[in-house]
Amino acid sequence: MMDSLRLMIYIVYRYYSSSGKRMIVAYLQTIMSSLLALYINLICVLNSLNVIPNGSFIDTSSDEELIGMLKIGVFFFLPGYLLLRLMFKEDDLKKMSFDEETIKRGKGYLIRYAIITGVLIVISSTISIRRIQ
């Protein structure tokens, strides 16, 4: 599983670094987009299991609650961000190499992952809407 995750991170990093951006920007985009994808799946699963009340962590009807939500967001993303930075250091990503057949297969997995994530979001939202009504 770790090898699959390493391959996916490498493919995303390779994509961002080939777009002509500075390497630090490519690395940051890789970490943040990977983290976002993992958290989207986590939230969909938690929402489907009715762990998140009414499909939302916090009621954002007032400014104080919105500021509270932003604080939760920072503390929610920070551990994952730090963990991914420890697991996938920029120097290690630069040194990684995979044969072209493995990269091609990995790109196929990423496309399937994106499609499955989209379906999971729709299913999770449908479950949440039915639960609220």
Image: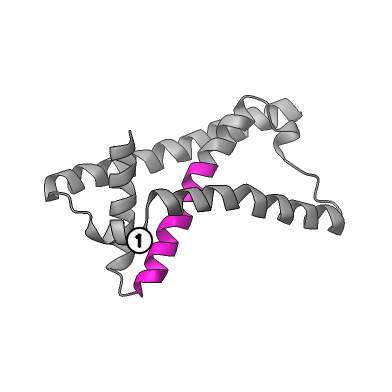
Left or right relative to 30: residue 121 = right
Please identify the quadrant where the C terminus is shown: top right
x 48%, y 56%: residue: 32
Q: Badge 1 is on which residue?
A: 90
Name which residue type carries label 1: Glu
Given residues 122 and 43, the one toward you in this image is: 43
Magenta stretch, residue numbers: 21-39
Dot 1 lies on which element? helix
x 17%, y 44%: residue: 102
Is-magenta flag for residue 120? no
Given residues 28 and 123, the one toward you in this image is: 28
The x, y position of residue 115, in whole percent, is: 39, 40
x 75%, y 32%: residue: 53
Given residues 35 and 50, the one toward you in this image is: 35
The x, y position of residue 36, in whole percent, is: 51, 50
Left or right relative to 1: residue 126 = right
The x, y position of residue 100, in whole percent, is: 13, 50
Residue 14, quarter of picture: bottom left
Q: What is the crowding at mark 1: few (fewer than 14 residues within 10 Å), some, or many (at least 20)?
A: some
Which SS type dominates the magenta stretch? helix
Residue 45, quarter of picture: top right
